[in-house]
Each structure stands twice: as C-alpha cells, then as structure tokens.
Amino acid sequence: MFFGADDSTADPDSPPLLDLVQMNFHHYTVSADYEHGCHWSGLPTLFVFGLQGDKDNPIYIGGAAANCVQDPQGHAEYAQVDSGFDALQHNLEQKENQMAILGARMLERQKSAVEAADTLKQRAAGEQSQLAGMAVIISLSMTRVLSIFAQWAGVDAEIDYQLNRDFDVSGMSAQELTALVAAWQSGMPGASGPNVYALMQSREMADPTVTYEEEQGRIDSQAPTLLGTQVA
C-alpha cells in the first residue's frame, strides 16, 4: 500500500510543504539583497571635497575608503541612506506573512490584541484542512493494510482504522465550564450527568478511557473535603 499526501496511489504527490519551501527560498534571496544593501550602504560614507587622497596620504574612516572630490571650497560631508530599504523590508514582511499562511506560524508576527475564541477556531480550521485530508488518506490506507493482514490471519471481521482528526486544543474556558455546571445543577434538559461528562471528554477535560459510571465511582469513593482538608 502507498501512503501519499493526496491519495493512496503509486503516483508521487506534491509535498504539502513544497509551497512553503519555495516561498522560504524567495525569502532567502530577498534577505540576502537586504543584508547586502545594509552592509554596503548602512554605514555613513565620507566625502572629502578639495583634497585628493592617495596612497601616500590615506584617509582612514569606518568604511573601506573615503571618496575625494576636487572642490576649491574644501569641505567634508557624510552620505548615508536615510530611508533605508523600505521596499526590500516590506517584501520580507510580506513573504513572512505568506509563509505563515502556508504553515510556518512561528514566523508570523503575533497580534498584540486578544482575538476572540471563535476567530481563533475559524483560523485554525482553515490551517488544519490539509492535515485533516492527510489523516483521511492515512486512515483509508491503514484500513486496507489491516484488512489484508486479517485475511492472511484467517480473521473474518470488518476492519476500520481512523486517525484522530480533532486538532482543536482550545479546551474549555472557565466561563463555559461554569455555565455547563450551572445547567447540570439546574436540571436543564440535555444537561444530564452523562451528557456533561461526555462533553468534558470531547473537550479533553476528562479521561476518554474512563466511563461516566467509573468516574462517578471515583468521586463517591473519595473522602469529603472541608476547606481544602480531607475529612477522615
């Protein structure tokens, strides 16, 4: 069996990170131009008017050499880039944002403002679509592989293999948990103990391998607590 990014055929698929690699290469070339410009133009350059510099009368300055220009008045000036390389810098920032969209979230400048939870979920859902598609392909291919193994072993059973495609790690906020407990305590329809516990399991706040009855048994077996101290 073949495991590809887009299907389970023997034809090679384009790597999911190929666009990111290409964008990273373009970012490198622009970065090289930017660093080259900063290296040669970032330091002030001395221009001396009215003095001819030569090997017998060198002029030492922070740069490699001074530029001497004939001028009867005679004076010296410094020339340097004032505005910098705004076009190159903007190009670098644009490519970093594009790479962030393509998957390199670590390169994106994070927003200082707090985003709403729904906004974060919607943005994460778009980023995870490629990952979810790959999980589906792997699940189908693994199902076929395990089915072949089962046939070899003489097992007549329906085989199904599924990777977890729940990539949401936001959990449950304190406000949501408070509202959920209040709904359970008030006896609101649909807010029974098993349903509340199942929701907590889906939000990764409870052990998914422990049933509601087992968890209730754990709670009942605990000693009562008074002001943070267990009562024997």
Image (cartoon, helix red, strand yellow):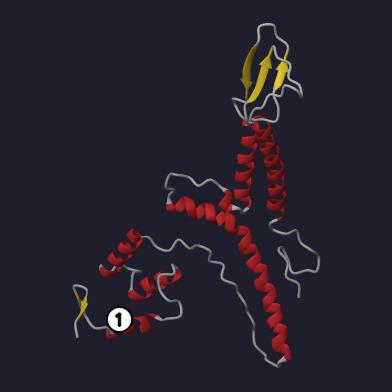
Q: Residue furthest front?
A: 56
Image height of 201 relative to 101, above or below: below
Q: Residue furthest right?
A: 11
Q: Is residue 47 above or below residue 143?
A: above
Q: What kind of residue is marked 1?
A: Ile
Task: Place residue 92 in its image quadrant.
Answer: top right
Could you tell me which residue is drawn at 61 percent across and 54 percent down? 103
Left/right of residue 122 with respect to residue 144 in the rendered view: left
Residue projecting furthest to the bottom: 154
Q: Nearer the viewer, residue 31 or 124?
A: 31
Read off the residue under disc 1. 219
How far from the left and from the top, in percent, is residue 173?
37, 60
> Please, what secondary structure does the residue beneath circle 1 have?
helix
Position of 162 with respect to 141 (left or right) is left
- Residue 217 rendering spot, x and y as whole percentages: 32, 85
Quadrant that contains the N terminus: bottom right
